[in-house]
Image (tube, helix red, strand yellow):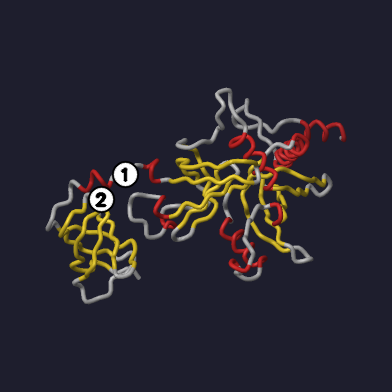
Amino acid sequence: MPNEEKIITNTPILTLESDTVLETAQLKADLIWHEIQNAYRTKKILTGMLGGIEKTENGSLIAIVYYKDFRTVIPVTEMVINLVQDAAHDYGDIALRQNKVLNNMLGSDIDFIVKGLDTKTRSIVASRKDAMMKKRQIFYLDKDSSGHAKIHEDRIVQARVIAVAEKVVRAEIFGVEVSIPARDLSFDWLGDARERFHVGEHILVRILEVQADNPEEIAVRADVKSVEGNTSRDNLKKCKVQGKYAGAVEDIHKGTVFVRLSIGVNAIAHSCYDSRTVGKKDQVSFVVTHIDEDRNVAVGIITRIIKQSI
């Protein structure tokens, strides 16, 4: 009987397709653990999803990253959260600010290098900082045969969205975190970046400027809009003075209402004939009184609010 049990255990699962071999959950876990062990020995960069934030018994923050279902712990000191703390930037408790930053990053992809393993419990401790420094060296400082780094000005590269706020997107570009303001995200009026960009997605950006002296000190400026292109200029030709168009209010600033017309044109209104107060995301009727080709916008009046945003 023991021999029969052994034969059954080692025999691949018979599937409906006779040449297909199914892996058990345990076998999959063993293979992934073996991969993690190899990565630990070779200091290979792995990528997982930031799935949680916890506090240890002594009150320290840790980030929980999942690599193929394996829980990986990264101390907040190894997450590269650079918060300026001085008289001019005194925003309160540093731990609360770190927690807020990490919370905004939940769901994003995180690179890390395994720093320690416990084979019995299969627990992992890692460093995001080490992975970022390694990528910075490879992509910003190492030169190819022509003397250029892989990332340079005017190159289009893929970036990870790691945090999104109303007026800014935080992206990680091969080990360097970059804040891209709303004005550089799109040629369209963009009232809320969170409606178009999401944590965890990959976007294309154009590198506008790079300052790289050493892995610790690299500054990058990038935009998204130059990659997407400006369709508003061509669409502006469809716009006629005294023409009436539907549009959505993207933003309001100091009495000026920024409208994105349904025909794909940016528009500005300084007055609204509707007795109700116009608000962001309202659907409005807009009459063009002037076309400003220098600024690439239509100027006009909001004649009425079609639908208010609640």
Q: Residue furthest left?
A: 242
The amino acid pointed to by label 2 is Asn
Camera-side residue: 90 or 309?
Answer: 90
Q: Quick check: 244 above or below 46? A: below
Residue type, label 1: Asn
Q: In the image, 75: left or right of 249?
A: right
Would you name the residue on which mark 1 appears?
Answer: 230
Q: Horizontally, is 133 left or right of 256 in the view? A: right
Question: Could you say where residue 166 lies in the image, as x and y percent from the top left?
Answer: 44, 61
In this orientation, which residue lies closer to the viewer: 294 or 2?
294
Single out the mark in the foreground, 2 or 1.
Answer: 2
Q: Is residue 257 left or right of residue 62?
A: left
Residue tagged by mark 2? 296
Label 2 close to label 1 by CB (< 8 Å):
yes
Q: Secondary structure at mark 1?
A: loop
Instruction: Look at 67% across and 45% down and name the residue there.
Output: 67
Q: Earlier in the sequence, mark 2 or mark 1?
A: 1
Which image quarter is the C terminus in? Answer: bottom left
Q: Which type of secondary structure does the marked residue at label 2 adopt?
A: loop
Q: Residue at x 66, y 49 (%)?
A: 66
Question: How dense is the environment of label 1, judged by Cα within 10 Å: few (below 14), some, or many (20 and up)?
Answer: few
In the picture, the disc for residue 273 is none
Q: CA distance from mark 2 to mark 1?
A: 10 Å
